[in-house]
Image (cartoon, rainbow, N blue to C red):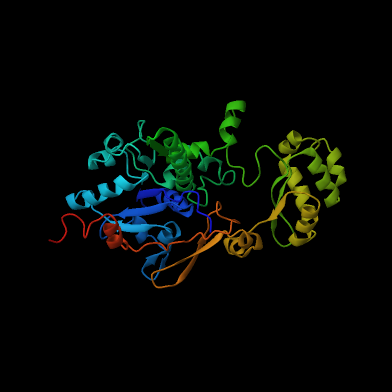
Amino acid sequence: MNELPLHGITVVDLTRVLAGPFCTQTLGDMGARIIKVEQPGVGDDARAIGPFMGDASAYFMSVNRNKESIALDLKAEGDRAVFERLLERADVLVENYRPGTMEKLGYGWEQLQARYPRLVMVSISGFGQTGPYRSQPAYDMVVQAMSGMMSVTGHPDAGPCRVGVSIGDLGAGLYAVVGTQSALLRRARTGKGERVDVSMLDCQVALLENAVARYGATGSVPGPIGSRHPSMTPFDVYAAEDGYLVIAVGNDGLFKRLCELLGLPGLVDDDRFRTNASRCAHEAALKRMLEDKLRGHSRAHWLKLLQDNGIPTGEYHSVSEVVEHPQIQARGMLAEVLAPSGESLGVAGNPLMAGGGKQVVRRQPPALDGDRMRILEELGLAHAPGEGD
């Protein structure tokens, strides 16, 4: 097997719960060595979050493959010595403490830069290292609400709605991966490490996509519109006889072809639907007409007809249907990790690895402090400084 892209890079992982661990797991999937430093006796907070398989957290296992674990108390002199020995050998330190915490521990950026000039420090926090909110705590729900993400999610008049996954954490984790690799590329040119400052709130604003541009261009405040696209029609989820499918038409030519396939050629010459702009203005009426036709046949019938004729379409899936889908299986987008009991847990794979013939899970999610002795031996320590005789 060819070496993975980040082979030879060592990451000291001082993160917990989701945003940080998702970042470091992705780096680990791409070949980096991840040494997870956890709180003695407790570990990553995610170890206590369900669902559980026996005593093991499936939540923790889903974002902590390809990592090693050592438990260190960064307020204890002996453990600090071990931590600093790790930093001497590390390329990257990733942390997601509240801003100011690393400085109080003596591991702020200025202190680290002076001692380890090649080290890249990646800090993930709710609001970033600067600004009036920098010291405030945050979770995914907080930044989804504050960023406006919730305001454009859901259906009109249904009240605020959270995106169905923790996009606040996941978005920050992915941007942190990009920032890490960018800093490593720059270090390859300059020989110097740098600080990467990732704010969950910033990342959510970046992911608002064209909502910000629409507001800037029109002055109209975007709101929730269900599943349809705000600027293209028909571009939505539609009901067939026995289920739902997506139809995504991005131009007038595709709309004409769609109408011909559905047996509705007269819609093309209807002034309400002649252009994309007019279709958007009369979206509700068009959807009713399309669904009246679509309900006459099964979803499978329409999917084949539309797919065979170049209309972008796809079936609406539950999670159980996704994990069984042949395309997902063929692309290797499912991975398997093992609980300490030996029980298997299916988890999402890494899309950067999909289709490449690479084994995503090289190391199982670690037991708390499970790699301690091997790491200490590697550092030339029979035991942690201050332990034993």
Using the image, determine if residue 12 lies above or below residue 369: above
Q: Residue at x 25, y 60 (%)?
A: 41
Left or right of 320, for residue 244:
right
Residue 215 drawn at (x, y percent): 58, 30
Residue nearer the viewer, 211 or 324? 324
Residue 170 drawn at (x, y percent): 47, 48
Left or right of 228, for residue 137:
left
What is the count of numbered marks?
0
Quarter assignment of residue 54: bottom left
Q: Is residue 369 visible?
A: no
Using the image, determine if residue 216 lies above or below residue 42: above
Q: Is residue 230 visible?
A: yes
Quarter assignment of residue 119: top left
Using the image, determine if residue 348 lies above or below residue 87: below
| Quarter that holds the C terminus | bottom left
Left or right of 306, for residue 324:
left
Residue nearer the viewer, 41 or 113? 113
Residue 194 drawn at (x, y percent): 38, 35
Residue 7 drawn at (x, y percent): 45, 51
